[in-house]
Image (cartoon, helix red, strand yellow):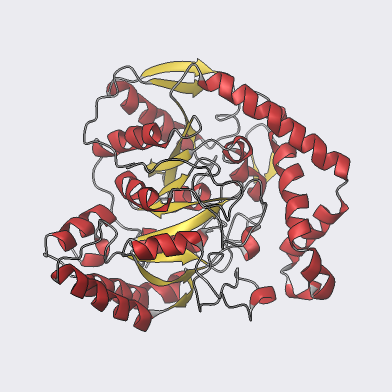
Amino acid sequence: MQPYELSLAAAADAIRDRRLSPVELVDSVLDRIDKAEPHLGAYVTVAAEQARRTAREAEHEAAHGRYRGPLHGIPMGLKDLIDVDGMATTASSRVRADHRATADSTVAARLSTAGAILLGKTHTHEFAFGLTTPQTRNAWDTGRVAGGSSGGSAVAVASGTATFALGTDTGGSIRVPAALNGVVGLKPTYGLVPRHGVTSLSWSLDHVGPITRTVEDAALVLTALAGHDPRDPASLALPPVDYRPGAGTDLTGLRVGLPRTYYFDHVHPQVETAVRHAIGELEALGARLVEVDIPMTRYVQATQWGLMVPEAGAYHEGSLRTAPGLYEEDVRILLEAGELMSAGDYVRAQRSRTLMRAEWARMLEDVDVIVAPSVPMPAVRAGQETVTWPDGTVESVSDAYVRLSSPANITGVPALTVPVGHDAAGMPIGMQLLGRPLGEPTLLRVGHAYEQTQPARALATAA
């Protein structure tokens, strides 16, 4: 096994025990980037020399007893919405072609303090306003979409061109590409991970979180990221938590909510089969299934778009006036639509969210987690715009991909996607776990328990 193939946890153990140096690991990942990146397009920019220099510094620290913890010497990618002092933050847009950050974002600073090594910036769907990331190809089949908007981060992790990466999630933008590329993606509780220094799509829906090879890896990254920052008004003032799950797989007594409504409607048969099989695995580990009805499902889409579109339009108001032609057409149309929405529509979406949060809180009193598909279908062919379901319903690809992930953004609850197999074409399928606010320890425990019962996952095969 080459160093770039190691999970974060495995690489951390090897670095801690002096069986692997940060320089060896970074060199291996950079070599992998050289081979895979021309086929995949995961990165906006690769800072190879900076990464090698930081790796040498990390190796020197470890050799002299200054080991910083499990992220020490681990190479990572950051979605190109996340500021790093002195580097461009383009949001994969011509609008930001000349923008250069003058300070680190909170998350970049925390990862640097923990010893992680930045490889470069990964592609996003322009300003995170889309579900496909057209610049990037799927890590399993380059003729298919990567998912978005954190497509570059998911493809980098799935292909071995980053040991872990950060994404952002406003309607599913961590979980969708993670599921479509067969890796783990965690959208934390709203406010748990600060967003200072991260370009916004929709302030009241935005989250930052990790994309990793394993659930344990996600827990290690979350432990470094979480914590109060007064520069983000939504940031929660909470004591530090070690999110690493235990090694056990016993889920006896755990109540798993199995949706009767919404989450299995208009879902590809192979996705449903794989997810229900994984649910059976949780039951075999001792979990008790409890059927639940998802509340207010008819209002999900209207609430998501009613919040996101006007907030995004307000954020981009200035540049839409001065440089509308620099936006890609799909994003510009959505931003202009946001400017046309009335204050009444926005207030109604806010009221709907308040009611939805209350109803979800009541539902989650009866279960510890809810389990569902992460996305209703595997990665579609690049350029495909719609999907037709067996009952004749036609749905846009973007609406389909956001449909099962957006409830967690509206309500602010944590959500984790875990790979649970592949379809007949070899494309990954993800299972989503949703929990109570600040219920990350339970989600990670359940996801890790499931993962331990499965064969080790290989890296993607497209490059």
> Could you tell me which quadrant the C terminus lies in?
bottom left
> Could you tell me which quadrant the N terminus lies in?
bottom left
- Up/down of 433 relative to 25, above or below: above
- The residue nearer to you, when weighing 426 against 10, is 10
Give the x, y percent position of residue 442: 38, 31
- Up/down of 55 relative to 183, above or below: below
Can you tell which quarter of the image residue 333 is in? Answer: bottom right
- The residue nearer to you, when weighing 390 against 211, is 211
Question: Is residue 154 among the parts visible in the rendering?
Answer: no
Residue located 27% across and 67% down the image? 73
Can you tell which quarter of the image residue 70 is in? Answer: bottom left
- Taking 283 as reference, is 166 left or right? right
Give the x, y percent position of residue 257: 47, 22
Give the x, y percent position of residue 6: 24, 59
Tell me how many marks there are.
0
Question: Is residue 254 among the parts visible in the rendering?
Answer: yes
Residue located 72% across and 62% down the image? 331
- Taking 366 as reference, is 285 left or right? left
- The residue nearer to you, when weighing 62 against 384, is 62
Residue located 53% across and 64% down the image? 82
Residue located 21% across and 63% down the image? 67
- Up/down of 179 relative to 294, above or below: below
